[in-house]
Image (spheres, grey):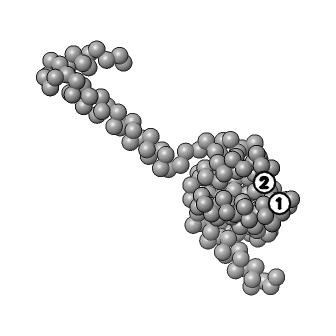
Amino acid sequence: MKKEDKVTVIASLTDTVKEYGHFYLVDVTGLNSSATSDLRRKCFGQEIKMVVVKNTMMQKALEGLSSEFEPLFPCLKGTTAVMFSKVANAPAKLLKEIQKEGFPALKGAYAEEGTYVGADQLAALASIKSKNEVIADIVALLQSPAKNVLSALQSGGNTIHGVLKTLGERAE
């Protein structure tokens, strides 16, 4: 490969890391073409971009971005595919689901501004809540007191005495 082509590939990888924000390094050693295309199809269905990369080019792309990716450099050995996602836990859930079928193992990941190294980190990565899940939890917590007051108003006969009685009988 010519040096100009390598520079282009490294720049493309750098842009992809910036665009998606979360990526997983996966060992795809031993996958045949049909298994690889099946994995790509599943990734596409969940809005995950999967790219098989040369380890040195991925390392150079990460070095150009930040030193926080340094713990992932030892993972860049063997046949490596990178799964890029905008949702931090989506690739982990996919890998956990297909791991039963003998699919690839996790080498390392960068998700929610943290590095995870090793296949044993898959459960932790799958349990990370996405931004939308956290927002939904916060909205539910904020709505809970308002719902209690509304239900007390409806069940209390629309009188102050009835509302106070209903709220007083509620177990805290």
- Vertical arrangement, residue 75 with respect to residue 49, above or below: above
Dividing the picture into quadrants, the one containing residue 80 is: bottom right
Kindly identify the amino acid type of the residue bearing the numbered disc 2.
Pro
Could you say which is closer to the camera, residue 6 or residue 154? 154
Q: Which residue is disc 1 drawn over?
A: 31
Q: Which residue is disc 2 drawn over?
A: 104
Does residue 27 appear to the left or right of 96 in the view shown? right
Kindly identify the amino acid type of the residue bearing the numbered disc 1.
Leu
Residue 77 in view, yes or no? no
Q: Quadrant of the C terminus?
A: top left
Instruction: Tell me the CA gap for discs 2 and 1.
Output: 8 Å
Q: Quadrant of the N terminus?
A: bottom right
- Residue 127 in the image, given as x and y percentages of width and height: 61, 41
Query: Contact, CB < 8 Å: mark 2 with mark 1?
Result: yes
Residue at 76% from the left image edge and 45% from the top image edge: 100
Residue at 75% from the left image edge and 56% from the top image edge: 26
